[in-house]
Image (spheres, rainbow, N blue to C red):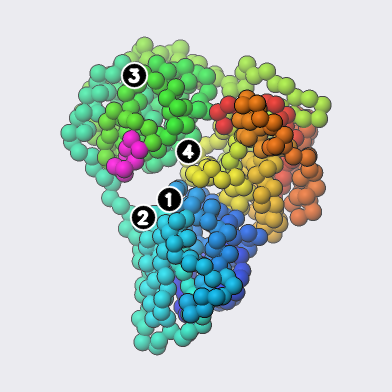
C-alpha cells in the first residue's frame, strides 16, 4: 500500500465522507483514491481559498470536523485567508496540503509551508515518513477536534508514492472525549449571586457558547428578575420569553437599545463581548459587566469587565440560581415592557426611499421577512450590505443555523460558506446575503454552486460599489468614486454559469421572484439593485 492510500484509509476511518478542495499534482491521486475506493464525496471548488471556506461552513453547520485538500505551493498559499478565519473561529478542520519534495528546493512551487501554515492555521502536522503517515493523520484530527481549530497536514508529493512498511500497525482513530463541564469556583458563584441580589436592573446576555445552557440561564433570569438578551451569534435562543430583548449590540433594535441603556448589571455567558456587542461602550454605559466563560483568557480580553467567572455557562447559572431567593422586579420586568417587546416591528418608522430603478434595501429585507422560510440556514457575508439582514431580519442562530464568518473581516465569504453549509445540512435551505463587490472576488464559485445543485438562494445586494469604503471616504472629503464601479448584469453572469437568476429593482419584482424560487429546491440567485445612498451605520 502506498502512502496516499494509507492516508485515505485513515481519513475515512475518522468518519470523513465529504472533502472539499481543488486538484493539483500533489493531491490528485489522494482525492481519486478517496472517491473511487471509499465513495467519499469530493466537492471541487474553483479556488483553494473558497474550498477551505466551504469546509469551514460545513463544520459550523454540522459540528463535525471538516476536511479540505489543496496542492503544494500556491495551492496552500491561496488558502491563507480562509485558514485564518477558521483559526479565529476555532473551526475544527483538517487541510491536507501537498508539498514539494524536500530534496528539490528549486522546484517552481517550492516555499516554506510550515511557517506559512503556522501564521494562518496556527498548527502544522508534517508527514515525514511512510511508517508514520497514519499516525500523523490521527494527530491532525485529534488536534483539530480537541483544541479546536484548523490544522495543516503536510504531505510531500514524493512521499505519497512510497510504500508503507508491511509491519506498520494501523493506528486506530482517536475518538475525542467531550470535555466535562467546568465547575466554577464557589467564591465566584457567591460573588455573582450577591451582585444579582443587589442589582436594580440586571440583564443576562448569552453568546453562542451558551446555547446548551439556555434553560439554566432562563431559570436564573426568572429567579433574579433579570432581562434576557443574546449576541447576534446566539439570536433566537430565548425566543418566546416575554422579557427577551433580542440581539444586543450595534445592531440592537430601538426598544432593546433603550432598555439596555438603563441596565446596572450585565452578566454575559459564553459571549466574546467584543466592541460590537457593547456598541463601543454606548449600549449599557452604566452597567457593571461580569463575564462567565470556560476560557479564562477570554474574560476581559475584548471589553473590560468588573469581574469574571471561569466556568461552564449551565453549571454557573444553576449554581447561582441555587443561592438566590426568587426576586420580583416589577419596575424592570414590567407589563409595559413585555407588551412593547411582543408587538415591536423592526420596520416601523422606517422612511423607505426606493426609486424607479433601485429598491431601498430595507424595503427588500421587509419582503424577505414576509417570504423566507423560518426553517433555514442564514449566511451573511462581510460588508456594508450585511447590516440590513442582520438588523432587520429575524434569523435564528440556534441549531447552527446562522453563519457569519466575519472573524478576519475578509470579503468574498458568503457564497463559499453557503455552499459548505448546504452540503453539510441538506435538510434545510440556505439563504445567503452577499454584496456585489464581495461576490466579484469569487465569481467562479457560482459554477461550484451550479454543479453541487444545493438549495442555496444567493441574495446579492448590489450598490455598484464597496459600500463600506464609500461610507467612510465621503465624510473625510475623499472622492468616493475610488470605491465605485460600473453596474454589471450579475444575473446574466449567474445564468451563464448555470445558476437560475432574477434581477430585482422594486418590491413587486422581489415578491414575484420569491414566488418563483420558493420553496427552494436548488440553487438560485437574486440580483437586487439597491439604492447606494441608504446607509447602515452599524454594519
Q: Secondary structure at mark 1?
A: loop
Of label 4 and label 1, which has the lower sequence position? 1
| Residue 296 lies in the magenta stretch | yes
User: Quarter of the image containing the C terminus?
Assistant: top right
* 508 left or right, relative to 309: right
Q: Secondary structure at mark 2?
A: loop
Q: CA distance from mark 2 to mark 4?
A: 21 Å
Q: Which residue is mark 1?
A: 90
* 511 left or right, relative to 137: right
Of label 3 and label 1, which has the lower sequence position? 1
Label ID, residue 147 = 2
Q: Secondary structure at mark 3?
A: loop
Magenta stretch in the rendered image: 293-301
Q: Tell me what residue is drawn at x 28 percent, y 46 percent.
A: 181
Number of callouts in the render? Answer: 4
Q: What is the x, y in percent for residue 360?
A: 71, 27
Q: What is the x, y in percent for residue 47?
A: 63, 59
| Residue 360 lies in the magenta stretch | no
Q: Which residue is mark 4?
A: 233
Q: In front of the other: label 4 or label 1? A: 1
Q: Tell me what residue is drawn at x 69 percent, y 47 percent.
A: 440
Q: What is the x, y in percent for residue 116?
A: 47, 60
Q: Which residue is mark 3?
A: 264
| Front-lying residue, 422 or 282 | 282
Amino acid at each position: 500500500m502506498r502512502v496516499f492510500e494509507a492516508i485515505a484509509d485513515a481519513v475515512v476511518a475518522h468518519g470523513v465522507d465529504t472533502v472539499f478542495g481543488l486538484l493539483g499534482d500533489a493531491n490528485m491521486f489522494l482525492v481519486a483514491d478517496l472517491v473511487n475506493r471509499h465513495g467519499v464525496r469530493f466537492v471541487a471548488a474553483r479556488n483553494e481559498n473558497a474550498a477551505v471556506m466551504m469546509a469551514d461552513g460545513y463544520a459550523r453547520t454540522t459540528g463535525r470536523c471538516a476536511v479540505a485538500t489543496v496542492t503544494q505551493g500556491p495551492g496552500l498559499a491561496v488558502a491563507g485567508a480562509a485558514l485564518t478565519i477558521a483559526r479565529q473561529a476555532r473551526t475544527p478542520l483538517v487541510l491536507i496540503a501537498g508539498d514539494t519534495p524536500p530534496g528539490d528546493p528549486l522546484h517552481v512551487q517550492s516555499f516554506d509551508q510550515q511557517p506559512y501554515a503556522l501564521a494562518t492555521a496556527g498548527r502544522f502536522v508534517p508527514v515525514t515518513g511512510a511508517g508514520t503517515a497514519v499516525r500523523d493523520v490521527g494527530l491532525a484530527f485529534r488536534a483539530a477536534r480537541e483544541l479546536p481549530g484548523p490544522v495543516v497536514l503536510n504531505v510531500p508529493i514524493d512521499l505519497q508514492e512510497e510504500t508503507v512498511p508491511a509491519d506498520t500497525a494501523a493506528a486506530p482513530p482517536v475518538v475525542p472525549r467531550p470535555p466535562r463541564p467546568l465547575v466554577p469556583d464557589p467564591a465566584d458563584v457567591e460573588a455573582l449571586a450577591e451582585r444579582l441580589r443587589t442589582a436594580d436592573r440586571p440583564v443576562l446576555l448569552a453568546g453562542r457558547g451558551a446555547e446548551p445552557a439556555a434553560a439554566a440561564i432562563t431559570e436564573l433570569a426568572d429567579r433574579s428578575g433579570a432581562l434576557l438578551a443574546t449576541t447576534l451569534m446566539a439570536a433566537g435562543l430565548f425566543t418566546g420569553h416575554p422579557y427577551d430583548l433580542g440581539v444586543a449590540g450595534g445592531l440592537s433594535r430601538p426598544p432593546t437599545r433603550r432598555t439596555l441603556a438603563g441596565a446596572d448589571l450585565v452578566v454575559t455567558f459564553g459571549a466574546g463581548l467584543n466592541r460590537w456587542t457593547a456598541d463601543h461602550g454606548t449600549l449599557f454605559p452604566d452597567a457593571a459587566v461580569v463575564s462567565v466563560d470556560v476560557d479564562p483568557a477570554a474574560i476581559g480580553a475584548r471589553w473590560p469587565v468588573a469581574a469574571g467567572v471561569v466556568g461552564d455557562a449551565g453549571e454557573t447559572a444553576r449554581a447561582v440560581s441555587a443561592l438566590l431567593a426568587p426576586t420580583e422586579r416589577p419596575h424592570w420586568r414590567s407589563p409595559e415592557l413585555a407588551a412593547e417587546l411582543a408587538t415591536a416591528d423592526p420596520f416601523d418608522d422606517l422612511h423607505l426611499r426606493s426609486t424607479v430603478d433601485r429598491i431601498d434595501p430595507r424595503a427588500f429585507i421587509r419582503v424577505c421577512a414576509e417570504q423566507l422560510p423560518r426553517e433555514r440556514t442564514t449566511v451573511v457575508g462581510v460588508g456594508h450590505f450585511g447590516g440590513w439582514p442582520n438588523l432587520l431580519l429575524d434569523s435564528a442562530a440556534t441549531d447552527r443555523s446562522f453563519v457569519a464568518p466575519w472573524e478576519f473581516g475578509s470579503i468574498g465569504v458568503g457564497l463559499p460558506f453557503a455552499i459548505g453549509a448546504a452540503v453539510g445540512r441538506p435538510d434545510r435551505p440556505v439563504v445567503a446575503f452577499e454584496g456585489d463587490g464581495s461576490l466579484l472576488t469569487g465569481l467562479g464559485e457560482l459554477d461550484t454552486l451550479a454543479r453541487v445543485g444545493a438549495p442555496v438562494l444567493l441574495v446579492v445586494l448590489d450598490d455598484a460599489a464597496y459600500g463600506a469604503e464609500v461610507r467612510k471616504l465621503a465624510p473625510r472629503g475623499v472622492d468616493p468614486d475610488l470605491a465605485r464601479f460600473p453596474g454589471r448584469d450579475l444575473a446574466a453572469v449567474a445564468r451563464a454559469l448555470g445558476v437560475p437568476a432574477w434581477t430585482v429593482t422594486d418590491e413587486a419584482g422581489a415578491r414575484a421572484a420569491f414566488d418563483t424560487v420558493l420553496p427552494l429546491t436548488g440553487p438560485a440567485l437574486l440580483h437586487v439593485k439597491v439604492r447606494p445612498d441608504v446607509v447602515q451605520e452599524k454594519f
